[in-house]
Image (cartoon, rainbow, N blue to C red):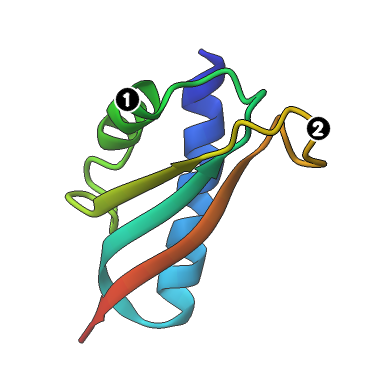
Amino acid sequence: MHEAGLIRNLLQKINELASREAATSVTRVTVWLGALSHISPEHFAEHFRNETVGSLAEGAELTVETSSDINHPQAQAILLRSIDIAEA
């Protein structure tokens, strides 16, 4: 599945950032979906919840921002905007 691979890559970035900050968990994740990313916020959220099981981001609140600008330079992208973490 194409979406699962994209989410796994995103989760890898989230885990790297969280580990760098010695986080015990990720409490919130904000992503941006380009207009041509071909995934709805609902579908993204479903994949995100499935892929985060057992990770630092399991149970994190997810905020999905969407773009309708098909001419945006990153219209095909899924971008990590921010993460909030809990520290030890």
Residue 47 vs 28, above or below: the answer is above
In this rendering, would 79 be left or right of 40? right
Residue at 69% x, 33% y is 69
Depicted 58 relative to depicted 81: above or below:
above
The residue tagged 2 is 71
Q: Residues within 10 Å of mark 1 (few under 14, many from 20)?
A: few
Mark 1 residue element: helix
Q: What is the quadrant of the C terminus in the image?
A: bottom left
As rendered, which of 82 and 47 lies closer to the eye?
A: 82
Q: CA distance from mark 1 to mark 2?
A: 23 Å
Q: Residue at x 29, y 64 (%)?
A: 26
- In the rendering, which numbered label is found on residue 86? none
Look at discs 1 and 2 and give the one toward the viewer: 2
Taking the spot 32% from the left edge, 25% from the top edge, the residue there is 42
Question: Does dot 2 land on a helix, a strand or a loop?
Answer: loop
The three-letter code of the residue at mark 1 reads Glu
Image quarter of residue 57 = bottom left
Tell me which numbered mark, 1 or 2, is placed earlier along the sequence.
1
**Residue tagged by mark 1?**
42
Query: Is residue 31 placed above or below 44 in the rendered structure?
Result: below
Asked which quadrant contains residue 18, the reply is: bottom left
Front residue of 12/59: it is 59
Q: Amino acid at mark 2?
A: Asn
Q: Is residue 79 left or right of residue 19?
A: right
Query: How far across and down, in percent of the image, does residue 79 sit?
Result: 59, 48
Mark 2: give few (<14), some (14-19) or many (20+) Cα within 10 Å.
few
